[in-house]
Each structure stands twice: as C-alpha cells, then as structure tokens.
Amino acid sequence: MAQSGEKIRVLIVDDISETRENLRKLLSFDPGIEVVGAAGSGEEGIALAREFHPHVILMDINMPGMDGITATQKIMEELPATQVVMLSVQGETDYLRRAMLAGARDFLTKPPSGDELMNTIRRVYEMGKARAVTMPAQPTGPGVGPAAPTTERLGNVVAVFSPKGGVGCTTVAVNLAIVLQQMLGDTQKVALMDASVQFGDVGVMLNLQASRTIADLIPHAADLDGEVLNSVVAPHGSGLKVLLAPPQPEMSEGLLDIIQEGGEEGESRSAFGIILDLMRQEFDLTIIDTWSWVDDITMTVFDAAALIVLIVMQDIPSIKSARLFLEVAERLGYPLDKIALVVNGVDRRRGIRVEQIEQAMIPVAAQIPLDEHVVRAAVNHGTPFVIRDRGRPVSQGIASLARYIKDALTEDEEESEEEGSKKAESQKGVGRLRLGRRVFR
Ligand SMILES: Nc1ncnc2c1ncn2[C@@H]1O[C@H](COP(=O)(O)OP(=O)(O)OP(=O)(O)O)[C@@H](O)[C@H]1O
Ligand SMILES: [Mg+2]
C-alpha cells in the first residue's frame, strides 16, 4: 500500500495511443495511483522516466524503434529503483524472458483487467519500497548458473510456485510438506523452506515463532555447515524441519541484496544458493514455498528443483499467467514433466472446468478442493489442515499430490540407479530431473 498517503506514480509507455488511453482510464479509478506521463516510444519513455522518476512503468514489449526491453535495460541502469511491468500479447515469451533479465519485475498479458493492473502495480510498488533490486545481469538458467557442488549426492527439491499471488502456494507447500514427512519421514529427512524471504507466511501457518531464520544464516554464508544450519531450522511437532523467513520488517534491504547477490568477493554463488545447497546436503527432500515472481531467488530454486508444483485456480488471469509461465519454463530449458500442475480451490460448480485447464495447458497432477472453513480454521489455529482435518477432501487432495510427487521422485531414483546416475544426468542435461513421461501420455 502507498506509504503515508503517497500516490503511486505510474508512467505508461506504449506506441498505440488507444492502449495508452485505455490504461490511463483504468488507472483513473484508483485514487492511490497517479499517471505522471504517457510515452509513445522507448526513447520518450526513458526521457519521461528521467523527468518524473515514476515508481512503476507499464512498458509495452514490442514497439517500433527502441523496443520495451532495450528501454527497460536503459531505465534500470539509470533508475534501478523503478519497477517495470511488461505488457505483452500472447506468444511473446521469448521477449518476455529477455525482458525479465533486463530488469522487468512482472508482466501482464494485454489487455489486462482493471483488477489485474492495479494489483500488479501495487505489488511491484510495495516490492520496490522494500527493496531496490534489479534482475541479474547474467542469465541463471541451466548450464549458465553457478554450479552446485557435485561430489555429494544432493537431496531433492520440490518448488511450489505460481506467477499469480494469493492462489494458495503457501497453503499447499505447508500441508504438502507435512504429508510428505508423514509418508517418508521414517527413512528420509524432509524439510520445508520459506523462500518468500521477505513476505514469508510459513511460520504463521505452522505456528512456529522463529527465534532463528534464514536471515541468521546470511552473515555466515561463506562458512556455513550442517551444524549451523541445524541450529537455525525450526523443528515442527510433526517431525518436519523448517527453515523460516524472518517476520516481515526484519529482512532489511541490505540483507536481501546480500542473499540474492551474496557471497564474499570471488564467491560466484549467491548466499541464497549456498544456503539451498546446504539444505540439499542435509535433507533428502526439501519443499520450497516461493513468492510469485521470477527473480534470482526463484530461478535458483527452479534450477535446483526436480519438480515445480505450479498452482492455478479456476480463473482466467491465473490460468493465463500459468500458461505464460509454462512457456517461459520451456525457454529456460525445463522439460514439461518438471512441472506438476495443481488446481487449487477447486469448485465444480464455478469457474473454468479442470478439463478445460488441462486442454489449455498440461495434464493436472492433483486437484485440491475449495474448503474455506477448514482452510481458514487451520490458519487461525496454526495447525495445518492435513493434521487437524485429515479425512476432509481438501486434505485428500494434498495427499494425492504427495503421492504423485513420491512416485515421480522414486521413478527418478530408480531410473538413475539403473542407468548410473552420472550418465543419466549428463545425457539429460537437466540436473537431477529424470521423471517418467507416463503421466503425460
Ligand atoms: N483450497 C483452498 N480452499 C479455501 N481457501 C484456500 C485454499 N487454498 C488457499 N486458500 C486461502 O487463500 C488465501 C491465499 O492462500 P496462500 O497464502 O496460501 O496463497 P499464496 O499463493 O501463498 O499467497 P501469497 O502470494 O500471498 O504468498 C488464504 O486465505 C488461504 O487460506
Ligand atoms: Mg505465500
């Protein structure tokens, strides 16, 4: 939310005057937002950004002359605190990936709805307030990112992600981790990590008052070991070990910069990457709750993940963003079977049908029903619903996702063993991932 009555200053950059006017009209409904200017080209956009120092720029990706990506890059060099939201039409994912690497914070598909537009502007504005961080200058996709130590066998990572906020990532991650701990805990060490390092809710959902969090590990990133890590992870009553994010205000801008860019001089990996590697050394399976944008923290998680649980709800904006993410994932070189699509909050009477979602995307790995009562009661109580209300359909939905993950990872292990893990990995070229295609036939 805008601080102390400050209006969010927005600059619109689009070569089509009608689009500029439509955006301006939509934004005029929000008294907290002020459109400080509208530019018809990348060059003009840069000039107006210099003049007005907007908080947020809505930038068309594809313009004659200087395109939105180049303009974004130049603006990020001069005004790194500016938050750029890319506007694109379907099918421009190649651009989009480059735009994100150029420093764009988020993206919207044209034409955005009023709600989407305002929510995105507010979200990136809040992020900008909390941190003046630019995207990495170098791609961090597979093969180009810093290498994890390869001598040891690292544990599996399962990321829970959605490019739209508020669709249930934290809810799913927490409950899923508990069920996987129950399923595998006898033989495997299971952990949950909150990679929403600044806005983490995992502690609240598990009623864990963290005396120690990931923030305590950052200063030691250069010489971390299992002992230090184990003194920081919080034990939950279920047996699950949890690496928490600090309560909101505590992760200062400085710490956030360090965790992303991290490292001592000469250290190529970010502090976050080092901490993640250590989690993988200590735990056989780490479930990671992420926030909703693709930045270097989420990219580090994605690269490490054997599976990315992609959460959607039965509405168009959520499905559109998830589809866009699938395209981005493909560009990043991730095979589609690295993504486990999950529909959360399923209500058979409302919204887009699950079959339609599958047609638009990929087969759904699990469905989690809508159950406002049970889910809310669990949050209020600080006890996950898979513990409190084990028999309810919403808990069974999580259990089916857990079984899917267990099977996929087991299949991975078996195939790796058969073929000799090193050979299999080098053939696949995608790290640990070697999931069966059976599910996607
Ligand atoms: N299956 C469900 N049935 C009913 N309510 C749900 C369900 N899943 C999540 N919710 C509710 O939706 C809201 C958002 O959930 P949650 O915080 O898990 O989402 P998120 O994607 O992690 O959001 P954020 O972007 O804020 O991190 C919460 O109020 C949660 O209780
Ligand atoms: Mg969350």
Image: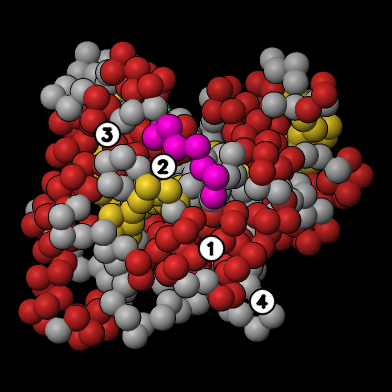
- Upstream in sequence: badge 2 or badge 3: 2
Circle 1: is it few (<14), some (14-19), or many (20+) Cα within 10 Å?
A: many
Name which residue lies at 41% across and 20% down. 380
Q: Which residue matches tag 1?
A: 272
* Residue that sits furthest to the right in the current view: 51
Q: Is mark 3 within 8 Å of ligand 1?
A: no
The magenta segment is 205-212
Tell me if label 4 and label 3 are in contact, CB under 8 Å. Answer: no
- Quick check: is 207 in the magenta stretch? yes
Q: Which mark is residue 264?
A: 4
The Cα–Cα distance between marks 2 and 4, rounded to whole angstroms, is: 32 Å
Circle 2: is it few (<14), some (14-19), or many (20+) Cα within 10 Å?
A: many
Ligand 1: give its quadrant: top left
Percent position (x, y) of residue 415?
11, 73
The Cα–Cα distance between marks 1 and 4, rounded to whole angstroms, is: 13 Å
Circle 4: is it few (<14), some (14-19), or many (20+) Cα within 10 Å?
A: some
Q: Which residue matches tag 2?
A: 162
- Upstream in sequence: badge 4 or badge 3: 4
- Mark 4: amino acid: Glu
Circle 3: is it few (<14), some (14-19), or many (20+) Cα within 10 Å?
A: many
Percent position (x, y) of residue 161?
40, 45
Percent position (x, y) of residue 347?
24, 19
- Upstream in sequence: badge 1 or badge 2: 2
Closer to us: 238 or 180: 238
Disc 3 is placed on an element classified as strand
The Cα–Cα distance between marks 4 and 3, rounded to whole angstroms, is: 41 Å
Write down the quadrant of residue 352 in the picture: top left
- Upstream in sequence: badge 2 or badge 4: 2
